[in-house]
Image (spheres, rainbow, N blue to C red):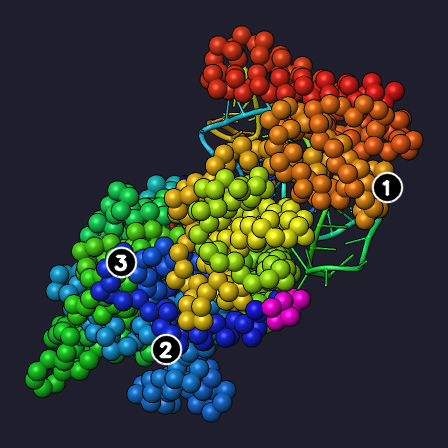
Amino acid sequence: MSAEGMPKAYEPAGIENKWYQYWENNGLFHGKPNSDKKPYSIVIPPPNVTGILTMGHVLNNTLQDILIRWHRMMGEECCWFPGTDHAGIATESKVDKVLRETEGVDRRTLGREEFIKRVWDWKAQYGGTIIKQLRKLGTSCDWERERFTMDEGLSEAVKQVFVQLYNKGYIYRGKRMVNWCPAAQSALSDEEVIYKEVNGKFWHFRYPLTDGSGYLVVATTRPETMFGDTAVAVNPEDPRYKHLIGKTVKLPLTDREIPIVADEHADPEKGTGCVKITPAHDPNDYQVGKRHDLPFINVMNRDGSMNSVCGKYAGMDRYECRKACVADLEAQGLVEKIEDIVHNVGFSERGGVEIETLLSDQWFVKMDELAKPAIEAVKNGDIKFYPERWSKTYFHWMENIQDWCISRQIWWGHRIPAWYRGDINDENREVYVGVTAPEGEGWYQEEDVLDTWFSSWLWPFSIMGWPEDTKEQEFFYPTNDLVTGPDIIFFWVARMIMAGCEFKGKIPFKNVYFTSIIRDEIGRKLSKSLGNSPDPLDVIATYGADALRFSIVYIAPVGIDIRYSNEKCEIGRNFANKLWNACRFRSMQGAVSENFADISDLVNSGKLTGDEKWMLAKLDACATDIQKALEGFNFHQAVHAIYELVWSSFCDWFIEACKVRFATGGEVKAQALRVLDYAIWKLLRLLHPFMPFLTEELAHQMGFLAENESIMYAQFPVTMEAEGAAIPDAAEALELTDRKFELISGGRTLRLNYDIAPGKKLDFHVKAADQRCYDFFMAGSDSFKSLLNAENLTISLEDYGSDAPATVLSGGAIFLPLKGVIDVAAETVKLEKQKKELLGWIKGTEARLNNPGFVSRAPQKVIDDTKAQLESLKEKLQRVETTLSQIK
RNA sequence: GUGUGUAUAGCUCAGUUGGUUAGAGCGCCACGUUGACAUCGUGGAGGUCGUAGGUUCGAGUCCUACUACGCACACCA
């Protein structure tokens, strides 16, 4: 393709769509379970089916895509299993809301069956949004294997697991204190409760003693629950109240009489030392109630309103009732005082409303036995966490694990496979648990559905067809890497490990990489209400998917929160454009070289220039760096390595150094182009996992691939040594070329200091530091000269020998011969400053070497290095002094 | 309360098992556009590495305490 075919700026939109379609239509994402290659697999953390793509998804899926594309290029048989989660409560409330807004009906008026049908309809119409959006990002998921947690097969897995755990005695049903969400009108697990600090009041009420001898003052933050009080507790050792134990008080606003009991739970230091006991609405009070055999009085309806036991307050909302209670107590003179306090209150993760704790019949999973092998798997290193510290969080939770409340009083989800026979209110009615309904008359199914996570925890194998035996499981299970946010370590990661160990007898994945949390530029969480949550699709439209992917990894710090703003995507966009133009420049020099992929003959011929060896060595180092970085999940480091390679080493130095050789033409140009092509093809492959679209486009544009080939399956670069063509004298070429480039920068500084236009050709003189440098600089003098934009460049072992501004560097000194224009004063100041610095370093280094402690204790290598350093400092000083004396 | 993290240039962050001139990007300043790229180039300014101790021949790096800001869990009448 000619340069005319390449616009001056990279325009991603059309290119991205073109290649994604090509990849997907040609089945390039598909992983086959019976390959003789090494398997590599990832399961996607299934996004909510109602969801739309967020920056969090972008980060998470970019990282997974980097991993899978990298492994694919290393010749492994890769499969990334995608899908979505039915997200019980979230989806149910979302569809409920939509129905209310659009049709004016809610789920209750529709009834269970009709409502569920509507949810499926809704899912069919809008549910695929996030899946379509993920494609825009370039994710190479195996879409043929897309699954949904309520697909038939996955539902089967859920039932099997439920029955299996029930039969093992790990699942039980019982009346327990649970977290209740009045918005969803369902029980929640402990993990679904978020504690937030809120400003509240501490009300001190007078509870009159029945015998008329006064009153007790109890303090509470929840006045409305007083209708459920069945005792007042005092500490048995509390001298203030000891004599009252066994007496009763009259519960205000009711006509009930309740006992004063002695219980350790009452802390004399807290509040008034007297605590109202509401056993049906507080976990601690529940325990007290059990110890003292108190009645359990439920005072609330499912929606958080007060129920019939509350007399005239019945039907009021809990907050309304709170106000009314306080007002009425005040009127009766029973309010002692009201304090302002800040306290933690539990909120429902999904509903956002304050949760209630109340007694109800729910299904639970006993977790302690399940946890044991899962703890062991992380302890013994079968599963590794990155960053490693998350394993502490994991252990802490796992070692204190509580039973898991899995029943939800909603409709959208997997209905619990349990059936009852007998009166619904009979606690001893018959129960049957099985995959299918029992035979016989009179059975009716449990109304509740399962917690969403009860299907998600099976994801790594249910997605592969479990409980059927499938080739997918045989080949791809356990998966290799899991990439997810640390916020779901309990919800999902820990439970998947337990499920894998229990049902497959094998861990579900080997490595877990926990991503950073994305925040806005000033560190706030991204949220819709703050309006600081960028739409990734807008970002992709503006900057390109590759730019977004690259930038977000580039700016992601190691293990702490990411501060994101759209402007940061300029990093990736500019980088893409830079590479695009480098390739555009190359294509202007003529057709792609033959044998661009293998230059071993050239390497062995001994014809490589120093610059070329330097470039190839840089590529080697970068390939090694990226390999190492990705093996340790250091995405950030990998991206920085390729950025540095492309922009600095390749564009700023190597291409610039090539230009003079292109101008020379003939064999010189042909060799330069071939090495350049080799380098471009290599760095495109290095970059492909990070910027898939751009690299595919350029690989074709440049002619590295035939029309029916894809860079997706090109080999991920290894070092030239691994290719069987080690670069001769690579280390020396690296060192001496660096020195040469350093001298060139020095020369440019001289030019600027003397206000000489960059375009003006002028003479330079270089005094090489030693014979080795001299020989190397002479061999590469063509680019040396052109990079300096010099009219003449003399390289010698001699000083320039007259008054000229100079800079002294490790490779030697560079002089700018300016007859008569030298600013002696300025030069003297500059050189004196350098001399002073050098003297300081020499003094310090000598002091170190004269320190007996250093010489006797430091390793020999450090001592040798220090000595060598001192020598070079002294040499440098000498050159500075010589130059100084010549100026004067 | 327990655990855990962070503090380095104006901003956002790198900085290997301690090795002695602490780096990058952005921003800033100066100069530059007859063609790879102004989404660019060349050069420059800018940091006593949160504070105080300690270990060591040597500390941004290890230890202790403190300060500030996070996060998780627990408590929360």
User: In the rendered image of this protein, does residue A846 appear above or below residue A381?
Assistant: above
Quadrant containing the N terminus of chain A in the rendered view: bottom right
In which chain is the residue bearing label 3?
A: A
Magenta segment, prevailing SS (helix, strand or loop): loop
Q: Residue at x 21, y 74 (%)?
A: A156
Give SS at disc 3.
Answer: loop
**Where are the magenta residues, as a range?**
A2-9
From this viewpoint, which residue is outermost toward the right?
A820
Neighbours of disc 2 within 10 Å: few (<14), some (14-19), many (20+): some
User: In the rendered image of this protein, does residue A463 appear above or below residue A561?
Assistant: below
Residue position marked by numbered label 2 in the rendering: A308
Give the CA separation, mark 1 to mark 2. Answer: 91 Å
Residue position marked by numbered label 3 in the rendering: A37
The answer to whether residue A209 is visible is no
Q: Is residue A854 left or right of residue A346?
A: right
User: In the rendered image of this protein, does residue A404 appear above or below residue A424?
Assistant: above
Disc 2 residue type (three-letter): Ser
Q: Residue at x 81, y 27 (%)?
A: A830
Residue position marked by numbered label 1 in the rendering: A755
In which chain is the residue bearing label 2?
A: A
Residue A108 coordinates in the image, percent (x, y): 37, 86
Say whether residue A4 is magenta. yes
Give the CA separation, mark 1 to mark 3. Answer: 62 Å
Residue A873 coordinates in the image, percent (x, y): 66, 20
Disc 1 residue type (three-letter): Asp
Quadrant containing the C terminus of chain A in the rendered view: top right
Q: Is residue A267 left or right of residue A468?
A: right
Disc 3 residue type (three-letter): Lys
Quadrant location of residue A444?
A: bottom left
Q: Residue at x 62, y 60 (%)?
A: A589
